[in-house]
Amino acid sequence: MHIARPRSQLVDWAVYLGVPLAAALVVFLVATMAEYPVVERLGAAVWTFFLVLIISMPTLSGYLRRGAEG
């Protein structure tokens, strides 16, 4: 039986949310520099956050699991 350490879970959550937040921030900043309206900036950032979250979750979970095991 494998019992996860609390620190390990904290790192997992930081990675799971950090990657999509970073991508959303990049999209928001690029949209701001291109002078898009605020609603379009926020919409693009939210869309990017969820899309990257959905796509990266399976990839990152396998990578983090392998890192924790060995």
Image (spheres, rainbow, N blue to C red):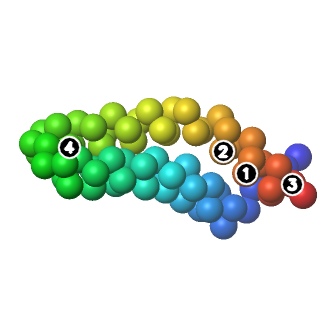
Find disc 2 in the rendering and name its residue: 60
The picture places residue 62, in percent across and down from the top left corner, at 75, 41
Q: Quadrant of residue 49?
A: top left
SS state under label 1: helix
Could you tell me which residue is drawn at 36 percent across and 53 percent down? 26
User: Mark number for residue 69?
Assistant: 3
Dot 4 or dot 1, earlier in sequence: 4
Find disc 1 in the rendering and name its residue: 64
- Front-most of residues 26 and 1: 26
Cα separation between marks 4 and 1:
31 Å
Could you tell me which residue is drawn at 58 percent across and 39 percent down? 56
Q: Nearer the viewer, mark 4 or mark 2?
A: 4
Asked if 55 appears above or below 14 in the picture, the reply is above
**Visible residue check, residue 21:** no
The picture places residue 52, in percent across and down from the top left corner, at 48, 38
Is 63 on the left or on the right of 11, as rendered?
A: right
Is 29 on the left or on the right of 16, as rendered?
A: left
Asked if 46 appears above or below 69 in the picture, the reply is above
Whether residues under marks 2 and 1 lie with C-beta atoms below 8 angstroms apart, the answer is: yes
Dot 4, crowdedness within 10 Å: few (<14), some or many (≥20)?
many
Dot 1 or dot 3, earlier in sequence: 1
Find disc 4 in the rendering and name its residue: 41
Cα separation between marks 4 and 2:
27 Å
Cα separation between marks 1 and 3:
9 Å
Cα separation between marks 3 and 2:
14 Å
Asked if 3 appears above or below 55 in the picture, the reply is below
Cα separation between marks 2 and 1:
6 Å
- Three-letter amino acid code at the position of disc 2: Leu
- Three-letter amino acid code at the position of disc 1: Leu
Dot 2, crowdedness within 10 Å: few (<14), some or many (≥20)?
some
Whether residues under marks 4 and 1 lie with C-beta atoms below 8 angstroms apart, the answer is: no
